[in-house]
């Protein structure tokens, strides 16, 4: 079939794909169609565009956001919660099955909480908002219902910053983070800005009561140090630093990691970031953290120094993709937690497989790369005892998980 010419077809949707698209035989992927539905779709190649519902699913519900299907931020708001939750858990089950791994997969943990505390707004040609689904066009929003209220209140500040920077003629991203002490904003794409522009941006930060404003990590003004809490420890993360998407996920994942590492005395936290797990666990165990992000490691160390009542916490800047910890270096530890980016931790997992650790807990936002890494650990003599899916990316095809490994 010509990829550029759409043909109107009646399709029976068999399942939901991993991105949240309905899948008809072919396969043909139809966004916003649900399993069991008969739809009319405009089809070109493997892509379908929903035209009409011939037989809607009994599990179809009304989406709560007026921008749904236009804004690309959410893929699924139109499916009843039980069916949605079964599908999201099934993403983890299927990834493990394809890797030939048998393990207990627990029910999905809902970790949306108050909403997402981080958002990246795109500024293009005078428009500010989120990108359309599978497009670079911008959907302008007055509010987003999946964000914490603090971020929605920050949209006015973001629009003012975009307007001030519009004359640069560059595509910009504004990374907003809601912290304990206020809104943190890091501008991406502006390049070097002169002193005059810096003063104007600082004035806007003052006017909108931003805690901190940065230009690609270079602090323009810090009126208050942005703060997040890991357990009982307060940390000021560097601009644009990685954090779990929701506060509820932070708590849920930490609880699962703590349970998975029960009994351990000395723990290595690999891909530690600013200390999400390292600092929360240090109330009871000795922790050594490793991450390639030097500013994040520095933030972790500052938080540990200021905290009271922690066991010893060490932190080292190290690129674990190119210099994974060797089995010999892992000997001082009886357990490890690792939480890599979406690409996973293949090189480090090979070294972990050769180590004689009692327990390993893997945290991942990508079931496919987790399953690949898990297979390496299993081949090295570990047993995957339990996997818990965690939904901090509600209404999307993304799912977090925590897997617990024990040495056979």
Image: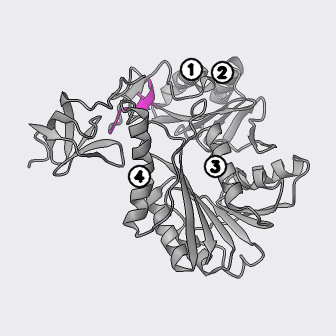
Identify residue for label 2.
Answer: 204
Kindly indicate whether the residue at mark 2 contacts the one at mark 3 (C-beta within 8 angstroms): no
The label number, if any, that marks residue 160 in the structure image: 1
Element on which disc 1 rests:
helix
| Pick the front one: 109 or 95 | 109
Identify residue for label 4.
Answer: 91
Looking at the image, residue 9 lies above or below residue 359: above
Q: Quadrant of residue 250?
A: top right
Identify residue for label 3.
Answer: 253
Along the polypeptide, which appears first: circle 3 or circle 1?
Answer: 1
Question: What residue do we see at 38% from left, 36% from top?
Answer: 75
Residue 272 falls inside the magenta stretch: no
Along the polypeptide, which appears first: circle 4 or circle 3?
Answer: 4
Q: Quadrant of residue 381?
A: bottom right
How far across and how far down the image is residue 356, in percent?
67, 80
Is label 3 or label 2 in front? 3
How far across and how far down the image is residue 375, in percent?
48, 72
């Amino acid at each position: 079939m010509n990829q550029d010419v759409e043909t109107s077809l009646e399709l029976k949707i068999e399942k939901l794909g991993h991105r949240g698209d309905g899948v008809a035989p072919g396969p043909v992927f139809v966004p916003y169609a649900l399993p069991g539905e008969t739809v009319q779709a405009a089809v070109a190649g493997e892509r379908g565009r929903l035209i009409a519902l011939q037989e809607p699913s009994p599990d179809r519900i009304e989406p709560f956001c007026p921008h749904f299907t236009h804004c690309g931020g959410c893929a699924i708001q139109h499916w009843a919660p039980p069916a949605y939750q079964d599908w999201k858990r099934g993403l983890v089950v299927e990834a493990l099955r394809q890797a030939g791994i048998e393990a207990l997969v627990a029910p999905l943990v809902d970790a949306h909480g108050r909403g997402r505390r981080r958002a990246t707004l795109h500024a293009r040609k005078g428009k500010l908002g989120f990108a359309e689904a599978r497009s670079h066009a911008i959907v302008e929003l007055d509010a987003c219902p999946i964000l914490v209220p603090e971020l929605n209140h920050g949209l006015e500040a973001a629009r003012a910053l975009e307007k001030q920077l519009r004359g640069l003629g560059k595509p910009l991203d504004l990374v907003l983070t809601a912290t304990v002490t206020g809104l943190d904003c890091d501008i991406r794409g502006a390049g070097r800005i002169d002193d005059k522009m810096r003063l104007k941006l600082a004035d806007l930060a003052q006017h909108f009561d931003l805690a901190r404003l940065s230009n690609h990590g270079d602090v323009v003004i810090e009126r208050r140090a942005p703060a997040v809490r890991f357990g009982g420890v307060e940390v000021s993360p560097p601009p644009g630093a990685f954090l779990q998407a929701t506060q509820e996920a932070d708590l849920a994942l930490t609880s699962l990691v703590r349970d998975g590492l029960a009994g351990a005395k000395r723990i290595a936290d690999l891909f530690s970031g600013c200390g999400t797990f390292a600092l929360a666990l240090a109330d009871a165990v000795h922790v050594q953290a490793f991450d390639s992000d030097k500013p994040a490691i520095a933030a972790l160390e500052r938080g540990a120094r200021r905290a009271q009542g922690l066991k010893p916490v060490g932190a080292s800047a190290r690129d674990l993709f190119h210099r994974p910890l060797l089995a010999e270096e892992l000997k001082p530890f009886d357990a490890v937690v690792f939480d890599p980016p979406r690409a996973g931790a293949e090189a480090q997992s090979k070294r972990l497989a050769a180590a004689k650790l009692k327990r390993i807990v893997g945290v991942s936002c990508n079931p496919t790369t987790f399953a690949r890494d898990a297979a390496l650990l299993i081949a090295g003599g570990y047993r995957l005892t339990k996997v818990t899916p965690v939904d901090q990316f509600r209404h999307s095809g993304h799912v977090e998980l925590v897997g617990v490994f024990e040495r056979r």
